[in-house]
Image (cartoon, helix red, strand yellow):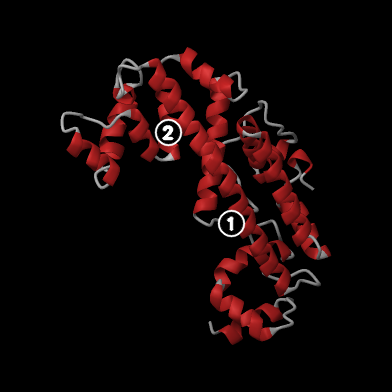
Amino acid sequence: MTLDNQVRLLRSRGMTICNEEKAKEVLLDVGYYRLGFYWFPFERTYPSKRNRVHEFVTGTNFDDAVKLYYFDYKLRSILAFYINRIEINFRNFLTYTLSNAFRNNPQWFVDRRVVSDDFILSFDRTIYTASFKLNPVIKRHHIVHPDDAYAPAWKTIEYMTFGSVINLYGAIKDRTMKIAIANHYGIRYIEILENYLEIVRELRNYCAHGNVLYDFIPFKYIRRGPAEVSGSRNFRNLNGAVAVVLYMLKQISVHRYTEMIEEIKSLIEHYSQSPELAAIISNISGLDAYNLR
């Protein structure tokens, strides 16, 4: 469909487009399909995804849909920055803890006395021999140390995905050691830390791949724990996920925790100047954790 026809279709469905040329520029830049996720909340039948009529509520403005798109984009950028801090911290603390516990065993991550057989088998098949073949740091290590079957933990784990690091934590056989790691983050139970890490990982992937964030629904429910998640709907939405990120971040750095809250507050205030957009953000973002609004 041509840009002219796209504009015509949107107007026929009740959308106000004040600057047609600018609208065409945005449609060509972002795309009609992708923007459709951001004008969906302005449709009469929202949030139902069945039997959509694609008609907009009175007063819907193209500019507000575009602003929601940029709100979502900037929120992803904020979350990605702070989630990266959590990922690196957990990766390093896990490596530090186990490497000091097994000082004479730098390849403890493939030792059947330390981790499960299933993890080692999966690691050999899908991580080390596949993903690491082209890694220049790992390749150089084996050139310099040809007798090593694996590079040491502090090198190897650095290049594992966040998901693989979480799986490594789950594969540790010594529950006492796993509890100690959970306790480091103010969490009593292994299962809650694993759940929190999975929520953080899933949200990280949403941000990394540019997925629509405002209607984020994690695959698993958020377990009850020290993160301040309240209200039944928040145990499986963006609000609850943000609460988990904030909790984990606070265990690492109170300064960064405060900084993240202020950045999200500022973002919400900036994009809530339009009453119509403010209502949409309030309803769909769920960002009421820690008094973000």
Q: Is residue 172 visible?
A: no
Q: Is residue 193 above or below residue 255?
A: above
Label 1 neighbour load within 10 Å: few <14, some 14-19, many 20+: some
In the visual, does 145 lie left or right of 283?
left
When asked about the image quadrant of residue 77, the answer is: bottom right
- Residue 134's x, y, as percent? 25, 47
Q: Which residue is mark 2?
A: 165
Q: Amino acid at mark 2?
A: Val
Looking at the rendered structure, the secondary structure element under dot 1 is loop
- Residue 191's x, y, as percent? 54, 23
When asked about the image quadrant of residue 7, the answer is: bottom right
Looking at the rendered structure, the secondary structure element under dot 2 is helix
Q: Nearer the viewer, residue 1 or 24?
A: 24
Label 2 neighbour load within 10 Å: few <14, some 14-19, many 20+: many
User: Which residue is drawn at the image coordinates 57% and 83% (left, top)?
Assistant: 3
Q: Which residue is mark 1?
A: 212
User: Which residue is drawn at the image coordinates 81% and 65% (left, top)?
Assistant: 274
Outermost residue on the front side: it is: 144
